[in-house]
Image (cartoon, rainbow, N blue to C red):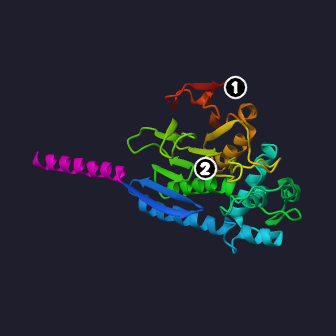
Amino acid sequence: MKKFFVLLLSMLLLLSGCSTEKNEASTRYLTTMDTVMTLTAYGPHREQGLDLAQAEIENLNSLLSTGLPGSEISRLNQAGAASLSQEPLALLEQALELYDSTGGLFDPTVYPLVRLWGFYDKRYHVPTAAELGDLLPLVGADRIRIEGSRVTLGTGQQIDLGGIGKGYASQRACEILKQAGVESALLSLGGNIQCIGTKPDGSPWNIGIRDPFGDESALYAAVKVEDQAVITSGGYERFFEDPETGKIYRHILDPRTGYPAQSGLSSVSIITNDGALGDGLSTALYIMGLEQATEYWRSHADSFEAILISDDGTLYATSGLKDRISSEHEVVFLSR
C-alpha cells in the first residue's frame, strides 16, 4: 500500500511539472524588417523553437530588404534581372498572384513612388505632377517576367516585397515553431499578429484591433482567433503633414494615381490562416474601399474574414466573425 501511494504521488508530481512547463513562456524582442517584433512561445520546446524562428526572420530580412545593398531584392532592383533563391521567388510569385486577384491594387512595383513621397526614409515630400508623371508609367507588376528562378523586371522598374514580407515572415516563423514542437505561441510583427493554437489554458487568443482615431494603446474592437493571423493596415501607421498646407498624407499609395489612397476606410484587418495573404489583402482592401472590398470578400470568403473601420467610425465585420468579434461600438455585419 505504501509503495502504491509513493507511486501515485510521483505520478501527480510528474503531471504537475508537465502542466507547469506547458504554461511557461519565453519572449524574444527583435527589430528587423523596419519594425519591432515580439515573439512569445510556450511549452518545453519554446527556446529551441524561438531560436529557429528568429533565425528565419533575420534570414528573410537579409534576402528581401531593399535597405540592404547585398539582398537579393536590392540586386534585382539594381540590375533589372537576377536569379532568386527559393523563398524570395515564392514570395514574389504570391505577390504577383495577389496583383492579379486584386486588379492591380496590390502592386510591389509602387516602390519608386514610395521613395518619391519619402515614406521609405522619412524624408517626406509632396511630389509635383511632373514627378508623378515620370514614375507612374513604371507601375505595373504584369511586366515582371519569371523563367525558372530568373526574374526580369520591366524597364526602369523596382520592387519592394515589404507589403507582404512581414506576413510571410510570421507565417514561416509559426511553421518553424510548430516543427520544433511548440503548440502555443503569439507573434507580433508590427501590425501583424499571428498565433499558434490557443492560449496554454485552451482558450482562444483575443486580439485587439487598434483604434485608428486614438493613441497607440486604444482599441476599437477585439477578435477571438485560434491558429490564425490578424493583420491590419491603416493610414495612421505612417503619415506626414505638409507644413505649407497642413494637409495629411498617408503612406498607403493607390497604384492607379500615385497618391495616398482615399477610399473612405481608416483601417482594414484581415483574419486568415495565411499571414502573407493577410498582409497583402489588408493593403489592397484598404485601397478598394468598403463596397469593392465587400465584393472581393464575397468572392473569396473561404480564404479570409475582415474587419473594416470607415473614416466616419462605422465598424464593419464579415459575417463569419459574428461570434468572435467584440466592441463597445455597434458592429455592422457584411453578409455573403
Q: Residue at x 73, y 52 (%)?
A: 94
Residue shown at 62% from the left, 65% from the top: 61
Q: Tell which of 263 and 196 is nearer to you.
A: 263
Q: Considering the numbered disc 2 on the image, is that residue within a helix, a strand or a loop?
A: loop
Residue 224 can be seen in this image: no
Kind of residue at disc 2: Glu
Q: Is residue 172 visible?
A: yes
Say if mark 2 contacts mark 1, CB within 8 Å.
Answer: no
> Which residue is painted at 47% across and 61% down in the image?
29
Query: Where is residue 296 shown, x and y percent of the image?
Result: 74, 35
Residue 145 higher or lower than 70, as above or below: above
Q: Amino acid at mark 1?
A: Arg
Q: Which residue is mark 1?
A: 336
Q: Residue furthest bottom?
A: 70
How far is disc 2 from disc 1 in space, using C-alphas? 30 Å
* Residue 82 vs residue 116, the one in the foreground: 116
The boundaries of the magenta stretch are 1-24
Residue nearest the viewer, comparing 322 with 285: 285
On whether residue 286 falls in the magenta region, the answer is no
Is 303 positioned to the left or the right of 57 in the image? right
Q: Is residue 14 magenta?
A: yes
**Which residue is disc 2 drawn over?**
237
Whole-percent x and y of residue 75? 75, 72
SS of the residue under disc 1: loop
Which quadrant would the N terminus be assigned to in this image? top left
